Amino acid sequence: MKAIYRRELHAYFSSPVGYVFAAVWFLLSGAVFSLTTLFAMTSSVTSYFTYMLLAMTVLLPLLTMKTFSEERRQKTEQIWQSAPVSLWGVVTGKFLAAMTLFAGCVCVSSLAFLILPLYGKVKAGILFGNLLALLLAGATFLAVGTFVSSLCVNQLASAVVTVAVLLAFLGVGLLSSFVSFYPLRFVLNALSVFSRFSGFSQGVFDPAALVYDLSLTAIFLFLTVRVYDRRRLR
Amino acid sequence: MIQVSHLTKYYGPNRALDDVSFSIGEGEVVGLLGPNGAGKSTAMNILTGCLCATSGEVTVDGLSLSDDPTEVKRRIGYLPEVPPLYPDMTVIEFLRFVYELKRCRFDREAHLREICDLLRITDVRHRLVGHLSKGYRQRVGVAQALVGDPRLIILDEPTAGLDPKQIIEVRQLIRTLARRHTVLLSTHILGEVTAVCGRVLIINRGKVIADRPTDALDRLVEDSLRYRYAVVGPEKDVTALLSAVPEVARVTPTGESDGEASVYVVSGRGGVDCRKAVYYACAKAGRPILSAAPLGGDLESVFVQLVDRDDEQA
């Protein structure tokens, strides 16, 4: 797993992908932070995190689009398929590399919060709750992207499908408010990443949301492993 | 060293491998020969754990690939048909990555230096893999197979797409590897097998149709033992005379003449030596043999005939 993790991190910075992701993230984060807090003269960060969650649906597929699709295109999968490593090791290695880059960018952009006390009292619970929620949602999004990438040969197709799936995850929550049939509304709400986000964003530690995000992440990583298991058996 | 038992592989309804069994002993260099689409790459991908067989078993040093894949994979170095190289890494970065991936426990730098020296890629070790020529990329592909010093090296079409000079270099390299490793080499080029292998497995339509030492392979085909005879007498009579000999499979007049004699190519039936029978038949009929010379059977014709015969039987 360690070898794959390091190889993936290397791949992000040996191509423009890592730099483009970081640049766009910092640019967007800076702009959203300025608009939602500095120009609004407030120390509240709830709007900032909501917008960044939306931005993640488009930005995070940049990190995962090449994960497996590029290996399939270049036929490099056999290097780890014939090596004494487990498929779980390969999948988690790749996922953790994407997560490291994403979390690194979140940490750096979070330095901006240091100036928030100038605009009022900062509620640490809400700030850290939002940060945790963003990282958990990011992990889920990256796991979805990793899974989609294992199904595609073309990295552009992988990115587009991942964006569509992530938007669907966000969309089901909005859709639920228009549904009057309770069981369906319950299911749509349960699938919504937004509704899980809201608890943390208000500074409330929500174990159900934590379990939800981690389970969803694990499920998509498991599905990625199954894709490769199945391909070996095809 | 490696034992393959009743390996069968289906891709949907298509059978790619059909009850393939063979074993390879320590230190052997074996060629897996077959036309394109015969199932060579499928077999190699199964042996290296990249694919699962529909049925059958692979064991290496008594360890089952399905039960203990990690330990088995440790013993195998694999160069697939397309070398699996990351073009964005330098040669040495790539080899270090493979070293870590295989969880080797040697002195890393000394081990990689030894491999680079053996493959003569030391001078390009700081160059990006993507910038190397095809020949160098192939060598780096072999180098990654050697990382971890595996006992069995599996090479799938190692000379595909190389120029003649590079082909000679790779063959020389395989001979060098054979001193320390067991080698299984897949190819559809016959010369490759005769050049480097001691034994050949011929595979066609997913079945092993021959498993012989390379130099004994030509005995497998009926007319592989051929002789050139110059016999005095009318061509029609001599052809009839020789064809009547039970040990003779086929008589073909070449149209050449040797003094007053005509020249014929005579093939032995079932690989038997027909020379004595031909001599007695000609002597009895009063047809002097002016010359007789063995033509042998070249591997190419043996291979084509084996494959054709297998296709006809199907």
Image: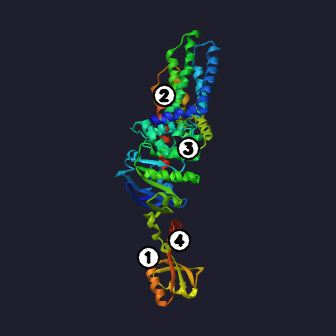
Residues beneath discs 1 and 2 located on the same chain: no
Seen in the picture, residue A19 relative to A91 is either above or below; the reply is: above
Question: Is B88 situated left or right of B268 in this image?
Answer: right
Q: Secondary structure at mark 4?
A: helix
How far apart in space, not on screen, are marks 3 and 4 (Cα)? 41 Å
Tell me, what colour scheme is on the image? Answer: rainbow
**Chain on which label 4 sits:** B
Q: Secondary structure at mark 2?
A: helix
Residue matched to label 1: B272
Residue matched to label 3: A151
Q: Quadrant of the N terminus of chain A?
A: top left
**Chain on which label 1 sits:** B
Q: Residue furthest left?
A: B62
**Chain on which label 2 sits:** A
Q: Earlier in the sequence, mark 4 or mark 1?
A: 1
Q: Type of residue at label 1?
A: Val
How far apart in space, not on screen, are marks 3 and 1 (Cα)? 57 Å
Res. B58 in view: yes
Q: Type of residue at label 4?
A: Glu
Q: Type of residue at label 2?
A: Ala
Q: Residues within 10 Å of mark 4 (few under 14, many from 20)?
A: few
Foreground residue, B161 or A168? B161
